[in-house]
Image (cartoon, helix red, strand yellow):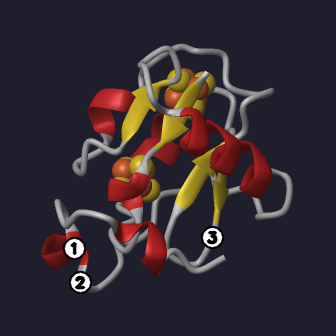
Amino acid sequence: TYVVMDNCIKCKYTDCVEVCPVDCFYEGENYLVIHPDECIDCGVCEPECPAEAIKPDTEPGLESWIKLNAEYAEVWPNITVKKDPLPDAKKWDGVENKLKDLSP
Ligand code: SF4
Ligand code: F3S
């Protein structure tokens, strides 16, 4: 499965949701997650994200993000259509340690 990492937080470009063949993205206020049981590992979303926030879960050290994606995918609503990025997306793109800014 693929996971959405911290650089999505406060950016939320949503290009990813448009290309996913199984519509497995779920939307929070300022972050998206992928449902691990629905993702078919096709990989098409990874290069679509302008913030480079999507990674395969086979990369080392992603345990906390895998857990976070699985948890929020159960409670947040599904998103399948692209919308405008968050207003300050450009400013926040690349800022480190944005996990504290996640709005649950
Ligand atoms: Fe959707 Fe494919 Fe990305 Fe999984 S890897 S979230 S199936 S686009
Ligand atoms: Fe987030 Fe990138 Fe999608 S910023 S909303 S993972 S396109």
Mark 2 and ligand 2: say if the CB distance to the nearest ligand atom is below 8 Å.
no
Please rate how many residues cluster around mark 1, counting C-alpha atoms within 10 Å: few if below 14, some from 14 to 19, many from 20.
some
The answer to which image quadrant residue 65 occupies is top right
Q: Position of residue 57 (x, y in %)?
A: 53, 23
Q: Amino acid at mark 2?
A: Asp
Q: Give residue 58's position: percent from left, percent from top.
A: 50, 14
Residue 84 or 50: which is nearer the viewer? 50
Label pair 2/1, CB-CB below 8 angstroms: yes
57 vs 13: above or below = above
- Quadrant of the image for the C terminus? bottom right
Q: For the residues labelled 3 and 2, say whether their Cβ atoms are less than 8 Å apart.
A: no
Looking at the rendered structure, the secondary structure element under dot 2 is loop
The percent coordinates of residue 79 (x first, y second) are: 65, 57
Q: Nearer the viewer, residue 30 or 77?
A: 30
The answer to whether 74 appears left or right of 64 in the picture is right
Which residue is depicted at the point 67% across and 25% down? 39
Lateral position of residue 83 relative to residue 81, left or right: left
- Mark identifier at residue 92: 1
Q: Which mark is residue 28?
A: 3
**Circle number at residue 56:** none
Crowding near the residue tagged with mark 2, few <14, some 14–19, many ≥20 C-alpha atoms within 10 Å:
few
Residue 49 x, y percent position in the rendering? 31, 43
Judged left or right of residue 89, residue 38 is: right
Spatial separation of the CA atoms under disc 3 and disc 1: 17 Å
Q: Which residue is mark 2?
A: 88
Q: Secondary structure at mark 3?
A: loop
Decide if residue 14 is in sight here. no
